[in-house]
Amino acid sequence: MNTIKLFLIAVVSPFLFTSCSADVLIEDDYSNNITLPELMEGYDLWYVDYDATTGTGDVPFLTRAFTVSFLNGALYANNNLAGIGTTGSGFGIRVGSYSYYPDAITVYHDVYGTFDLEVYQLSSNRIKLYDRYRNVTYYLIGFQRSNFDYDKLFNDNIHYFLQEYKAWEKVYTSRVGALNDFDKENFIQFVAGGSDDNFRSSQDASGTGVNNIYWDFTGIYGISNTSNMYTKILTLDYDFWGNESFTLSVINDHRIRLYHNNSGTTYEFEGRGFIQYLRQNAVRTKADNVLRKS
């Protein structure tokens, strides 16, 4: 995916902005002689290359987004992986609005408020957004929906997909496979945030409401790649009986399959309690060792 930096200016007086057709700020003498609206709206999607972010501050609506889109004054974002590529015809959900000024864009986010952004163009489809007030710089890459690889984005970031439900409920266990301790686990939760990747599990009866689940155990989980881009290895660290290793595959946006590598048992879990990453209390914290790739 291409990388885009948006230069954000905080506390800029309106009288400093005189026209919305000014050229984009140039870095390294790059210029394609287009206006800021032509640049920002010339691509369907701007992928937020979070790992390239520099500075000490935070612009929440960019930190929480995989992509953002500027569509005729309306700001859209793909904040969730569940439904990505289909939600909002691939644009995601509407999260605010924006207006142009010379070399800058002001975003009015529905939750996080107003951000005045200066835009630096780095290449034909790469920009830099810098928030001077918050001392943070983001890099974005422009794509059209027709050449954006939603599947790769999803599979490279399954870590976040697992966190988008309050709980995963076991709905299927295969008859094939040896008896094992994990047979008793009926719910799993993958916890967003914190320095470690935590999971919780429960042996509550199937059908228990999400808010009434008693979590019996909390541990650490990890995800690693396989030779097949559509499967991952999920490891759950249970202190008292050791690690449980599964081959993880995604059936659809709310159902996953876990093949227990030791016993040969296949389980299927459905997501319960979808978390829409728009609200202030739905915070996506990106772990240092988890890449958000194109």
Image (cartoon, grey):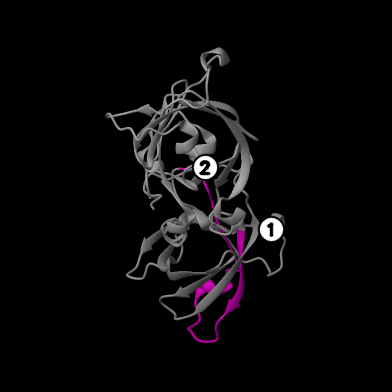
41 versus 24 height, above or below: below
| Amino acid bearing label 1 | Val
Mark 1 / mark 2, whichever is N-terminal? 2
Q: Which one is in front, 21 or 184?
A: 21
Q: Quadrant of residue 237?
A: bottom left
Q: Amino acid at mark 2?
A: Arg
Find the magenta span and give its range: 167-194
Residue drawn at the location 55% of the way across and 83% of the way down: 174
Quick one: label 1, few (<14), some, or many (20+) residues within 10 Å? Answer: some
Write down the quadrant of residue 246 in the picture: bottom left
Whether residue 200 appears in magenta in the rendering, the answer is no
Q: Is residue 218 at least partly visible in the picture?
A: no
Q: In the rendered view, tell whether residue 178 sits above or below residue 3.
A: below
Please give left or right for residue 135 compared with residue 96 in the image.
Answer: left
Kindly identify the residue that appears in the image at 49 percent across and 27 percent down: 21
- Is 73 or 251 nearer to us in this picture? 73
Marks 1 and 2: which is nearer the front?
Answer: 2
Question: Can you identify the residue that label 1 sits on?
Answer: 210
Say which mark, if any, is on residue 200: none
Give the label on residue 64, or none. Answer: 2
Magenta stretch: includes residue 180: yes
> From mark 1 to mark 2, how far is it between C-alphas?
24 Å
**Left or right, 31 with reference to 110:** left
Q: Secondary structure at mark 2?
A: loop
